[in-house]
Image: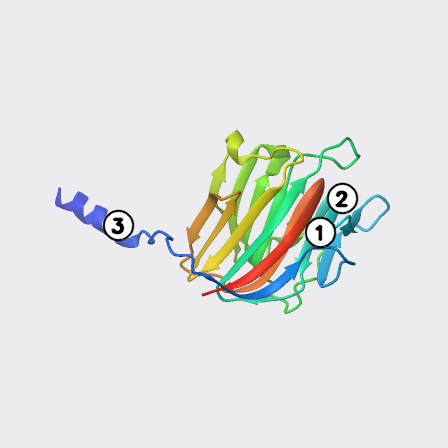
Amino acid sequence: MLISLLAAAAMAHAAPAACTAWGQRGAPLHRDDFSGPLAGYVSEYAKKPGNVVANRDGRLLIDVDSGATVWLDKRLSGNVLITYTRRVVMGGAKNDRLSDFNHFWMAQDPQNANLFTRSGKFEDYDNLNMYYAGVGGNTNSSTRFRRYGNGQRVILGEHLDAAHLLKPNRDYKVEIAVYEGCTRMLVDGDEYFSYRDPQPFTGGYFGFRTTWSRQTIDNLKIYQLE
């Protein structure tokens, strides 16, 4: 009995505290309604006929037959909140595929001060330090949250139920927060993932990520959290 009590106490002591505080919106850091030419981003994808990353009709369009990452070319640091709207378009076009509503945040390359050196292939990013969330991955069969670091991609959360998978042509409101060692992602106000990191990433880049799909993005806003 004593051993069991000691073990339980040790586990309770080792368990990280839940993330319950997320601060208040402070100074705006970035805002984009994608109404003009695409500027201030770095796009990594196979640049060939039929693949498009550009502003169209007041939204950022990512229309590709393979992997693509669109990085905001602005390093974020400290406590931040990222919000935007995103849609996976399904209408019978050649790249229409209900899958891979993905994100990278607080991304850094530990071997290179210049992060933007990749082709857009998913495996190109394996050696980064960052957080990753993929909604509707694997042809809309899984939704996962990972921490990349030291060459490892550790799954910290997973959903397989229909409520956490994608619906076509629906605008989703996404909020990603990094605050005092915690990070989380909300989709339409529902918490998909939350994690207190014992070794948190406190600075890096944010990127929209997908593979073989047609998606549009609007109303990107980033704030410092106080």
Single out the mark in the foreground, 1 or 2. 2
Query: CB atoms at circles 1 and 2 under 8 Å apart?
Result: yes
* Residue, disc 2: 64
**Which residue corresponds to the image point at 65% horizontal and 33% vertical from the top-left?**
168
Q: Badge 2: how crowded within 10 Å, few (<14), some, or many (20+)?
A: many
What is the secondary structure assignment of the residue under circle 3?
helix
Question: x, y (%) of residue 91?
Answer: 75, 32
Identify which amino acid the numbered label 2 is placed on: Val
Identify which amino acid the numbered label 3 is placed on: Ala
Question: x, y (%) of residue 139?
Answer: 64, 33
Query: CB atoms at circles 3 and 1 under 8 Å apart?
Result: no
Q: Up-down: is 208 above or below 101? A: below
Question: x, y (%) of residue 154?
Answer: 49, 48
* Residue, disc 1: 120
Left or right relative to 18: residue 134: right
What is the secondary structure assignment of the residue under circle 1?
loop
Give the tally of numbered discs.
3
Q: Earlier in the sequence, mark 3 or mark 2?
A: 3
**Which residue corresponds to the image point at 71% horizontal and 37% vertical from the top-left?**
89
**Which residue corresponds to the image point at 52% horizontal and 57% vertical from the top-left?**
149
Q: Up-down: is 203 above or below 165? A: below
Left or right relative to 49: residue 113: left
* Residue, disc 3: 12
Query: CB atoms at circles 3 and 2 under 8 Å apart?
Result: no
Left or right relative to 17: residue 127: right
Identify which amino acid the numbered label 1 is placed on: Gly
